[in-house]
Structure formats: C-alpha cells, structure tokens
Image (cartoon, rainbow, N blue to C red):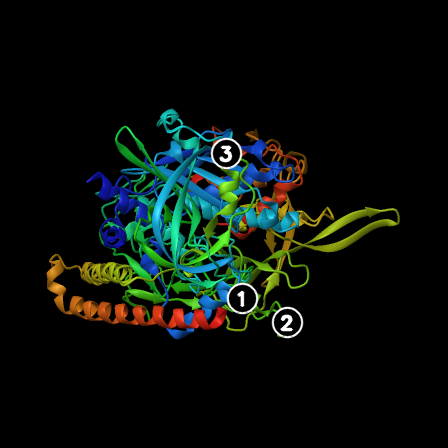
Amino acid sequence: MGKKVMLLMLVLITNCLWAKNPFSNIKDVEKVIELSRDVDLLVEGEIIDKEYIYIHRKTKQLVDINNISLDNLGKIVTFTKFTVRIVESFKNRGNVRDVNVWVLGGVLNIDGENKINLTSHTAYPLLDSGDTMIMGLKKNRNIHPISNIKDDYVDGYHFYKAEKLQIPSSDEMIESVENGELEKAKKNVYNKKLRSLEEEGSTEFPSYEDIDNNILKASIQKNKNIEAKKKFIKSLKISLRREYE
Amino acid sequence: MSKFLILTLLFISINLFSYTTNHYGYGMCGEYANFQVSKSDFPSYWEPMIVEISKNAANWWNEAGSEHHLYYDGIGTSNPEIEYNDWCDSTALACTSWWVNVGCFSTSVITITVNSDDSQWLTSDWEKSFKMQQVLTHEMGHLLGLGHTDDSDDYEAIIMNTYSYPNKNYAHLTEDDKYGVRAIYGKDDQTLRVGSSSIYTYYPNNSPTIYASGNSDYQTYSKPQLVYQPNTARGYDYIAVWNKANTREINYRFVNDCGTNNNSICGLSGDTRHYIEDSETLTTPSIAVSDDGYYSVIAWKQETANKKQNEADDIWYSRIPTYIHSCQVDVNCGSSYESHKLFDNSGLANSDYSSFKAKTVSQPKVVWVNNWNRFVIFYTKLDEYSLAWRIAYIVSTDQYGNFSTNPTVHYLEELIDISTPYGNLWYLHPLKSNWNPMAINCNQTYDTTKKACLLVFNEINTDTNTSYADNVAKTTYKILEPSTVIGSFSVQDITKTGDWDRKGYGHYSIASREFTNLPAHTVNLLNRITKSAKEVVNNLRFVIYKSGTTWHGDTISNHTSSTSYYSRTGYSMVFNPVKQIYKYFWIQE
C-alpha cells in the first residue's frame, strides 16, 4: 500500500514526464533533431545500474547514510548516478560503452521505509534497470565542490531538455505509456459525463462500465497510438543516423 | 519489465482524487506553511528585495482561492526554505526539491533553490527582479504540489509551464494555475452565506474561515456587494451582487434589511436569484442604483482573451430595471440580463497602444450622480502618452443606464498651483492611479447643500524622476463635485498631506493612526459611505475603519525597507491589483 501511494504521489508531482510523451509524427522528428544540436551525446541507452549519493545541502560534504534521520532529511541533497549502456550512439559516437548520467534526487531507506528525494524538474530517479530511451545528454558542469566525487561527477552527464529529448524507445516502454494514457482517457470520459449530469441536476450517475462505448473508442485509439509511436521511433532513429553520420 | 507500467497506471488514478481537499496523498500537509528565506545566501544585489519578492509570490498563491496558505516566517534556514545554491540543473533558474514517502508533503523537507549560476539570469537588475517574481511563483507552485504544464503552446498555462516565453504575460496567475491549486486543497471562496433566513457578507481575515453555505450558487470568487435600493415599494431594501464561484457569472438577488444586525440581510423568500448572461469575472462586480431606485447598472472587469504582456482588460456592464425586479412591467427583461461591452474609442488608432482602447487595469466602479441623473463608470486606463494610468470615466446617455457605443472618455484632472521663482504656475494635473479607484460615492451631501463624490485612490507619485516612480504611490482623497455641465467634475483635494505623505520608496507613513482634524464634510461623507457606517476601502493598501466615534487608518503591512528595490517588487502588484489584498480586509467592530 505504502509503496503504491508513494509512487502515485511521485508521478503526480513530477507530471509523469514519460506519460506525456508528445511525439507522434514526422514533424516531431525535426524538432528532436533541432534540440539535439545542443547536446554533447545523443544515444539510445539502457539503464543497467544506479547508485545514490547523499550530500549535506549547506556544508556540501558527503553524508554517511547512518547519520541521516528524519530530523535532518530536509538538509540532504541526493544524486542518482545511473550507469547507461549505449545501445546505439547517434551524435558524438565513440568507443565508450557505458556512461554515467547524474540526476538530482534519489532514494533513501530510513527505518525500513523508502524516502524519495525529487525535484520539480525530474522524476528520473525512478528509472530502473532495463528502461531504455533515446537520451539527449549534456556534460556535467564543474560546479559541485565535493572533493571526493568531483572528478566522477564532472566526467558524467545529465539529461538535457527532459522529456523533449528523453524518449522511451523500447516496445515495452511505449506500450506501458499508452496503457497509462488509455486509463487516463477513460477517466476523463467518465468525469466529463459525471459533470454534465451534475449540472443537469441528476441524482443518478452511471458506473464506470456504463460508458463502454466511449471506452472502446479509447482502446482503439490506444492501439493506434502504440503503432504510431513505434513507427515514430523507427523513423527518428533513421533520421538521426542520417543527420549525424 | 520496468516500473513504467505501474507509474503510468497510477498516474491515471490521480483524477480520482483531483477534486478532493488536502491529505489525500499529494500537496502539502496542513492548511498553511511558514517558509523562511535564507537571505544571507543571496548576493548583495538580490538581498534587499528577495524577501519582498518571496512574499509577493506567496501572496499570489494565497489569493488563488485555495484553502492552503503560505506565510513568510522570517529570515532563516527552516524548511520550507528559499536558498541560493547550485543544485539545480544547468539551465534552470530555480528548482524545488522534497522528500516524500507516503501521504502529503511534510513542510520540513522542502527546499526552493534559486540557481546561483548568475549567467542564467538576465543582466539588468530590473529584469532580474521581475524574473525572480515569476520564478519564485513557479517554484511555490511546485511547493504546493503542482507539476509542470506539458503543453508549451497552451497560452493560458504559463506560470507552471516548463519554459518561459518572452511575449507572454507572467504578471498574474492564470486560470489553470488557480484551478490546479484549488483542485489540490479545495476552494477558499469568499462566501455569500445563505442561512435559514439571512445572507451574510463575509470577508476573510488572515485565517480565513469557510462558511459552507450548502448552496454553491452563493459562493463567489470576489467580495460580494450589497447596495441600498432607495425605493422600497416592491418590498426589498437591498440588492446583493456576487460572481458565482463555479461559473464566474454575475448573480444578484433582492433582499431586505433585518434591522437588528448591520451585517445581516433578511427576506430571501419572494425573490429568486438572477444572473447576467455571458458575464464572467474574477473580480468584485460594482453596482449602483439610480436615485429613484428604478434602474441599476452593474459593471465588472472581464479578462481580455489571449492577453499579451501589459495588456489590460475589458469593461462590461449590464443595466437592470431593479424596481421592477420580477419584470412584470418591463417586457425586455427576463430571468437574466444581457451584458454589454463598454466602448472607449479614445485610444490612438493604429498606434502601438491601440490595443489599450476600452481597456482597464482596475476594476470598474459604477456610481449614480444625482446632479446629472446619470450613471458614471470610473476605471483606470493606460495613458497613451505617459504610459501611466489615468483615472477615466464614461457617463451614461440617460438615467436608465444606457451607454453610447461611441462615448466620450473623460479624465479626472485637477488644477495645481506650483510656486516658481517667477510666480505661481497653474496647470492641469491628471489623476493617476496604480490601484482601483474606489470608495466613490456620488450621492452624498457636504457643505450642507452640495452633493458630491468621494474618491479614494492610490495616487501614482510623479514627484520624482526615478525610472520606477510609477510604482510609488500614496493614498489620496478627493472630492469630485459635479458641475452643471454633464460629464465635468471639479476636483478638490482633501488629503491630509502631513499624515499621508510617504517616506522612502513605496513606504507609507501612516500606521494605526487616528484621522484628526478632518473637515466636517469629509467625516460626513465617510459616515455615509455605507448604511452600516462601517467601510473598508477596497483594494487600496489601507483599511479605514471606525472605532467609537473616530475614523482610523491602518497600513496593511508595514514595509520597513526604504531601499529603491521595494518599488520594483511593487511592479508585480501593480499588474495584479485585485487579488493581493482581499484577505487583509475585515469588518472592524
């Protein structure tokens, strides 16, 4: 229960970036290419590992997790360091097989309970091993004066332009996103119906199942979307190869 | 299998909760949060103004109509904290971070970080200041539990948009922002309360209490208005006017005075609620009744669609045969009344400022001028030449509240005497305001025989040559005496300069001060502003109240800063003249 509610909340506050993937047609390919000009590395990558790093917000010293409690949690900043295995490199391809991607935020277990640190800009700490995306990566700045990790950090990358350049690319991810969109569409249809009945002064309201026809339409649309997005990813990859060959 | 499936499915179920109040798993815990500003982190050019900007940003959200409020709790590092640091992504001006597990956000783990990478900020101090207001408003939206809007082309949803756009107006919260925060915390409507036999006008104080009326038709986004209807032949002494919360449509109803309590109105039976078609406003509607009580005019401000930066809003009005309240005689009225746009053709044609024609930056105020047998609608209009805001007015063409489609726009001006080395110089001084010209009552007697208006407004300072002088203002009182020519007022200054003078930029000298030595006619006017003899001067930065037999004025907040930065932060308040202030008003016994 706890974990589900937690995830629910996290997804809301981070606006579920991947659930709102806006890409669907050929014009979007051009947009991605345009945005990708600013990145240092453009790859299709799979997350294979992650590690959390805890830093004191004010002293900027690494903090031992044993010294973190609920009392000082507000002063702790977390980074998640992902190890990303490059499936295909589009821009600035080299011999590098894995790169590190640093994301502000992470997870800490206190007294058997997971506490999650997120920022307004990203829910990416929730990515997990196996997740595969086209990633627009920018080299980290030389700003964090934490001596023990500085070199490691500066060698790494961060996600650039959020969902505009982090695009779920595996079939599994695309399908899960669209399943989510379908549920949202169902809920919207249902809520709209309830609102109109309420305005009419009705005291009887349909159940979720009573709006089957509309749900059917949404399901058909979902399947169309999945196909469109898979097609989009294919054409995006071809265009990126051509652009940066 | 990744977590994406779980996440996306869970995201959907958000809608199940999206119209409940707090404590359902997102948003901040509790009904308020006290934030602190880590002021010493900020570089010297930010330091003098960062607190005021933070408070302004919080106030925007506080006035969005939700049940949650953010309060500034001094300089310090207690969470929620606003700090200046380098944790954010490289291209972000700021970010908000929090720790969560289950349930609502604990205030003790939220931090807003303003990006200390100065290259991300614009170079001019003024631009920085305005940008900071936008940025902190955006971050406080996150603090309250709002995410980014995902549609970069959505013109309306700009405050919580991921990116900023140079041509959009960031000087106010959008509907999308307000609905978002209300969806999380529930509404904090000011309520025209309906009891078993009475309506109460209720103005929230600093700790708003919600009176659930049980009837959403009487919930309102703005202060409800109550006006005395002189002719009681139909059995109703008052007209109550409000904008209905969910539709924002103007509603009104004829009611009676209970006679025992100045704030309670009886007589709900007999008349029904009426509404004005196609009327929509978030601000307080204004109403005036003709001297014979036969006709009323309601005026309101309607936000201009697709408003550009600095663009003002439309004025609309509706005339209502109030005596014939249920329309037995006037065949043109039904259960609802049509709204009309007020035209103002005085703008410069084909100029950059032509879009300001017929537009107001303040709530319009309608009054009945007995001497002319006419209604007059006052508003503040952008002056094409000085880019300051002049108090303008348009006079109805008849006593029934009809207005011309090509009306003459008048401006309030007074003759000023300046002593120069060469003698006295007289010139016409336009009255300028950066707030709603309010408390205008044009049907009161003074000097035993004359009927005149009392005008109270936030006068823009024109004494200095500083670049931000327009943001400096003081409260000014004038008497407007209608001349024999319809449309022409003579203006008399009754402001007590010694008491009301400002000290420093945007700093008001008055603080809980008794008004002494007011002219008898001024006291007379103040006493007659409302039948209840108690008045809050709306939308100015003061409250005026009567304690015992004397009148007092209080500043709404005591600004101690005398630095030049204060007035820059005031810029945003100028563009958001309506919503900042409501919660500070109360009926003072």
Same chain? Circles 2 and 3: no
Q: Nearer the viewer, mark 1 or mark 3?
A: 3
Q: Residue at horizontal 59%, vertical 65%?
A: B409
Q: Nearer the viewer, mark 2 or mark 3?
A: 3
Q: Nearer the viewer, mark 2 or mark 1?
A: 2
Image location of residue B487, percent across then percent down:
59, 62
- Residue bearing mark 3: A148
Image mark for residue A37: none
For this orientation, the residue located farthest to the right is B422
Q: Is residue B538 visible?
A: no
Image location of residue B254, percent across then percent down:
31, 53
Tell me the CA gap for discs 2 and 3.
61 Å
Mark with earlier residue (2, 1)? 2
Image mark for residue B351: 2
How many numbered circles are shown? Answer: 3
User: Please, is residue B549 above or below residue A100 in the view?
Assistant: above
* Chain that bears disc 3: A
- Secondary structure, mark 2, is loop
